[in-house]
Amino acid sequence: MIDVDIRLQVQDGQRQFALAASFATEAGFAALYGPSGSGKSLTLQAIAGLLRPQAGHIRLNGRTLFDAAAGVDIAPPARGVGYLFQDYALFPHLTVRENVAFGLTTWPRRQPAPAQRARVQSLLEGFGLAALADSRPRTLSGGQQQRVALARALACEPQVLLLDEPFAALNPMLRDELRAELATVRRQWGIPALMITHDADDVLALADVAFVYAQGSIVREIDVHDARSRERTREALGVDRPADSPTQRRVRALLHTSDG
């Protein structure tokens, strides 16, 4: 269960942005959907502990990660989350193996323990990266870089996987393949995932539930499998695509609520 109810304000020069996000889900794969600048990334950063809200709480599987009223704010490394950044954030001077193992090391202990090394090797093999273990990120394709970043996020055995626009940096021809691969990985590892995206195809391919963002708040919750929706502010606006199934057309229309 991911339970988020947060309020925060950020300021950049003269521009201020207020976020008021509240949702709870037990879905295996949830999407935060909406246009750029609607508050999705701020929500993900707050869950990861990279940004501190001014009010509210964040709970993961009954464990409180943040509670402004109670003064609880768990440090990011102790939160039990794996974070896949939009640009993957791989370290260019490290090999693939070293990148995957990076979160398992500390300054006093520069090498992973034997069990951790075995886990890294298992991840390399599972993601088809074993032959590239000694390569540097600059020599990898976009799809290979994503696999390295995903393996690194899973190396610390997180309780939830946070995905920031996981396909935005990829060639469109690769996206369908890697969506399917990500779905398979998530099922194999049995780990819940929370993905932010502004691409309806990501939602249709992967998500069980979608929370639609607009101007700093969640305006709609959508059950992707049967297209039931609890509207919070506005009537749906949308478009149909002949290639979509009837359920996919309804989901796509509901997602486009945020575009109006």
Image (cartoon, helix red, strand yellow):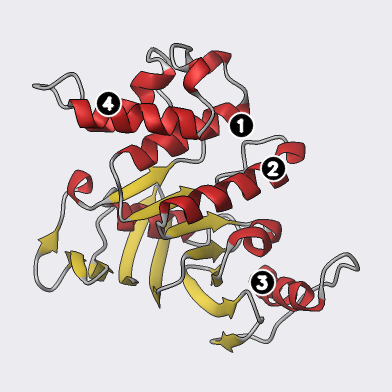
For label 4, the residue is 117
Which one is earlier in the sequence, the residue at label 4 or at label 1?
4
The quarter of the picture where residue 20 lies is bottom left
Can you say whether 81 is above or below 153 in the image?
below
Q: CA distance from mark 3 to mark 2?
A: 23 Å
Give the percent coordinates (x, y) of residue 34: 59, 63
Characterize the local packing of mark 3: few (<14), some (14-19) or many (20 or more) Cα atoms within 10 angstroms: many
Q: x, y (%) of residue 182?
A: 56, 47
Are the residues flagged by discs 3 and 2 in contact, CB closer than 8 Å? no
State how far apart marks 4 and 3 are (Cα).
42 Å
**First-in-chain label (3 vs 2):** 2
Q: Say which of 188 and 202 sits in front.
A: 188
Q: Amino acid at mark 2?
A: Glu
Q: Are marks 3 and 1 in contact (CB under 8 Å)?
A: no
Mark 1 lies on a secondary structure that is helix
| Left/right of residue 28 with respect to residue 110 in the rendered view | right
Q: Is residue 113 above or below residue 61?
A: above
Q: CA distance from mark 3 to mark 1?
A: 27 Å
- Quarter of the rendering containing residue 36: bottom right
Residue to which mark 1 is pinned: 143
| As drawn, 202 above or below 62 | above
Mark 1 neighbour class, 10 Å CA radius: few under 14, some 14 to 19, many 20 or more = some
Pick out the residue farthest to the right. 242
Front: mark 4 or 3: 4
Residue drawn at x 17%, y 26% as measured from the top left: 113
Task: Measure how far apart labels 4 and 2 are at the Cα level.
Answer: 29 Å
Name the residue that disc number 2 marks: 177
Q: Which amino acid, by three-letter code, is at mark 1?
A: Gly
Label placed on residue 224 = none
- Where disc 4 sits, the SS reads helix
